[in-house]
Amino acid sequence: MKKREILSQIRLSDSQKKKLNDEIKAFYLDERGEEIGMIEQMQLLELFEQRLAPVIYNKALDDAKRWYAQLLDNMESDYYTLYKNTD
């Protein structure tokens, strides 16, 4: 069995970074009426990658675990409904 690699940091592709930088730029312009430079966009995106992304990733794992546990609970009750009455 292959050992899983520990995820140390979430990495975005260049195209994802470009799209998110465009979103940051649009947000600043639409919401704040300000233009934000490329360096500031990159710094903000780096901050999100390093600080926010792991929190969101962990939350998604917790949500998936709860969903899977509920699915297993339902499977067990569904399993016993298939039993035939032998009396």
Image (cartoon, rainbow, N blue to C red):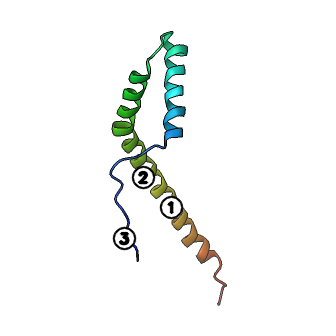
Task: Describe the element under mark 1 as helix, strand or loop.
Answer: helix
Q: Nearer the viewer, mark 1 or mark 3?
A: 3
Q: Nearer the viewer, residue 68 or 42?
A: 42
The residue furthest bottom is: 87
Q: Residue at x 63, y 75 (%)?
A: 81
Q: Kindly identify the residue that appears in the image at 54 percent across and 72 percent down.
A: 76
| Residue 65 x/y as whole percent | 45, 58
For disc 1, the marked residue is 68
Local crowd size for mark 3, using a 10 Å CA cut-off: few (<14), some (14–19), many (≥20): few
Residue type at mark 3 is: Lys
> Percent from the top left, x then y, of residue 49?
39, 38
Image quadrant holding the N terminus, namely bottom left
Residue 13 percent across, percent down from the top left: 49, 43
Q: Which mark is residue 62?
A: 2
On the image, the x and y values in percent for residue 14 come to 49, 40
Real-space CA distance between mark 1 and mark 3, rounded to the nearest whole angstrom:
22 Å
Q: CA distance from mark 3 to mark 2?
A: 21 Å
Residue 19 higher or lower than 71, as above or below:
above
Q: Residue furthest top?
A: 33
Mark 2 belongs to which amino acid? Asp
Instruction: Name the secondary structure under disc 3.
Output: loop
Q: Name the residue at 52% across, 67% down.
A: 72
The residue labelled by disc 3 is: 3
Q: Does label 3 or label 2 sit earlier along the sequence?
A: 3
Q: Amino acid at mark 1?
A: Tyr
Marks 1/2: CA–CA distance: 10 Å
